[in-house]
């Protein structure tokens, strides 16, 4: 579903190019979950942006659902994000002027794949069935993140990218949201790539890789 093949990325600085990622290689299959760990500034967000087609590598190739991202222009990469990807961030990025129900349906409508039965199931499993007419500001932090996860999964994406999805939640809420996220990912059949700094959050996922000095390794390597 996702493959990085010897991908490198650097950013310009007054002193010259600053390498961020060096010869990154990994693959992620449909239905598989992978935690990406690393210290702040290690390049985790850069890797996630590359996976989403929001940035391009200096060298190497990234394949998403069999499509080489480097062969796609900006409009084609935007279409792939809309149709193939779900994105969940530490900040919820809900639309404040839309109700809970309309926020949930937004991504699926943009992708042209709204499924009323799946929406109903999501609302129930998210624990939001009595809150569909409320607005994001009327929800708790945990409820807002549940809604953001549901919105990302409503279009049944091939790949869900999650950047510290429990980072803004207290420990109890974080555990509940993670359990719900992994359950929905398993049932939807999509792959999950999740950035986290927490070994506890990473533990339930199928695999874990650590990014150190721009290179990937097993956590205990």
Image (cartoon, helix red, strand yellow):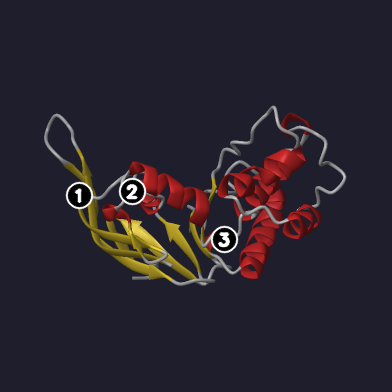
User: Residue at position x 15%, y 40% from top?
Assistant: 17
Crowd rating for badge 1 (residues with CA inside 10 Å; few <14, some 14–19, many 20+): some
Left or right of 17 on screen, residue 42? right
Q: Earlier in the sequence, mark 3 or mark 1?
A: 1
Q: Which residue is mark 1?
A: 58
Q: Which type of secondary structure does the marked residue at label 2 adopt?
A: loop
Q: Nearer the viewer, mark 2 or mark 3?
A: 2
Q: Percent x, y for residue 36?
A: 43, 59
Spatial CA span between label 2 and label 3: 21 Å
Residue 133, quarter of picture: top right
Residue at the (49%, 53%) spot, across then down? 196
Contact flag, marks 3 and 1 (Cβ < 8 Å)? no
Which residue is pictured at 27% across the width and 54% down the height?
71
Name the residue nearer the viewer: 38 or 162.
162
Which tag, 2 or 3, sits closer to the chain's start?
A: 2
Say whether disc 2 or disc 1 marks the residue closer to the N-terminus. 2
Using the image, determine if residue 137 lies above or below residue 26: above
Residue 58: percent from the left, percent from the top?
20, 49
Foreground disc of the pair 3, 1: 1
Quadrant of the frame with the C terminus: bottom left
Query: Residue beneath label 2, please?
Result: 43
What numbered label is drawn on residue 12?
A: none
Rendered image: mark on residue 200: 3
Residues at marks 2 and 3 touching, judged by CB atoms closer than 8 Å: no
Q: Residues within 10 Å of mark 2 (few under 14, many from 20)?
A: many
Along the line of sight, the residue nearer the viewer: 175 or 119 = 119
Number of the front mark, 2 or 1 = 1
């Amino acid at each position: 579903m996702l493959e990085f093949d010897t991908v490198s990325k650097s950013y310009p600085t007054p002193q010259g190019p600053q390498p961020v990622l060096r010869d990154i290689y990994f693959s992620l299959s449909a239905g598989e979950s992978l935690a990406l760990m690393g210290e702040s500034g290690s390049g985790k967000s850069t890797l996630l942006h590359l996976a989403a087609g929001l940035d391009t590598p200096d060298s190497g190739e990234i394949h998403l659902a069999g499509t080489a991202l480097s062969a796609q222009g900006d409009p084609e990469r935007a279409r792939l994000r809309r149709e193939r990807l779900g994105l969940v961030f530490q900040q919820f990025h809900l639309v404040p002027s839309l109700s809970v129900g309309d926020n949930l349906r937004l991504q699926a409508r943009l992708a042209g794949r709204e499924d009323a039965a799946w929406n109903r199931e999501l609302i129930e499993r998210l624990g939001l069935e009595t809150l569909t007419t409320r607005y994001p500001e009327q929800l708790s932090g945990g409820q807002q993140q549940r809604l953001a996860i549901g919105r990302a999964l409503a279009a049944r994406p091939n790949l869900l990218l999650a950047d510290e999805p429990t980072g803004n939640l207290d420990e109890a809420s974080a555990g509940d949201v993670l359990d719900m996220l992994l359950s929905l990912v398993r049932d939807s059949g999509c792959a999950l790539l999740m950035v986290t700094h927490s070994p506890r959050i990473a533990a339930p996922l199928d695999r874990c890789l650590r990014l150190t000095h721009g290179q990937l390794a097993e956590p205990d390597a």
